[in-house]
Image: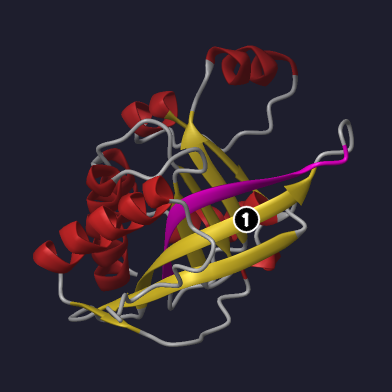
Amino acid sequence: MDFFPFDTVGLTVSQFDDFYQTYTKLDAQFSIQSTGNIDFHLDDFESFRSYSDIKVRGSFVIKGCKNDCYILFVESNHNSLSDKANSTDYQIWAVAYLKQDFGRVLIRRETLADKITELVHPVEIDFAEDKAFSDTFYVLANNHQKAVAGMNRNFRNAVMDTRSDDFIIEINEHSLLIGHPNSISAEKSVHLAEFIKRIANLC
């Protein structure tokens, strides 16, 4: 039997292929190593609060970083109240552990709806010295001082350089999570790995 570095049980051929192509591309471009079982406490993040069950099918440490950082192959399940049926999502996420406490922070691309809401209820963090970043990203935090202190110019530049539009970044104190909730893409996963490695070396 062939050995695969992620849990293949129950995957369709298409789902297996998505994970395998992603793993192969990451392994070719980065020094990654399977971690075995680690509890990444994903249920502490708002991004996973709507799911009834979260399973890490594979986790890989990216070697050569100042701080620990990982790529995760995740299966997320939730119950639909409307039809009482289960639905399952397969996603790629990256995690880094940071020296500095950022509090709780959410960063994503800013939408027109966000801009309109901001006119009525100004809750977003803006950086007056970095208009390009503030015009591009929507930033919410529970501790303004910690978030601003952590999101220095180098951090903001790393976020600006991320080559994708549909990612979400969530920070829970010393843990940073980034991912694309809606798809598995080998190319996007490389971008996640590049970003998380850069953040792990900066923060």
Look at the image and name its color scheme: secondary structure
Closest to the observer, 186 or 194: 186
- Could you say which quadrant of the image residue 123 lies in? top right
Report whether residue 197 is seen.
yes
Q: Residue at x 21, y 81 (%)?
A: 63
Q: Note whether residue 143 is visible.
A: no
Give yes or no for residue 67 being in the magenta stretch: no
The span shown in magenta is: 84-97
Residue name at image x 23 percent, y 41 percent: 161
* Nearer to me, 87 or 190: 87
Measured as percent of width and height from the top left, residue 45 is found at: 65, 60
> What percent of the width, then of the height, locates residue 188?
29, 44
In-image side of 63 versus 183 (left or right): left
In this view, 12 is above or below 201? above
Residue where numbered disc 1 is placed:
76
* Three-letter code for the amino acid on which mark 1 is drawn: Ser
Overall secondary structure of the magenta stretch? strand
Q: Residue at x 54, y 62 (%)?
A: 10
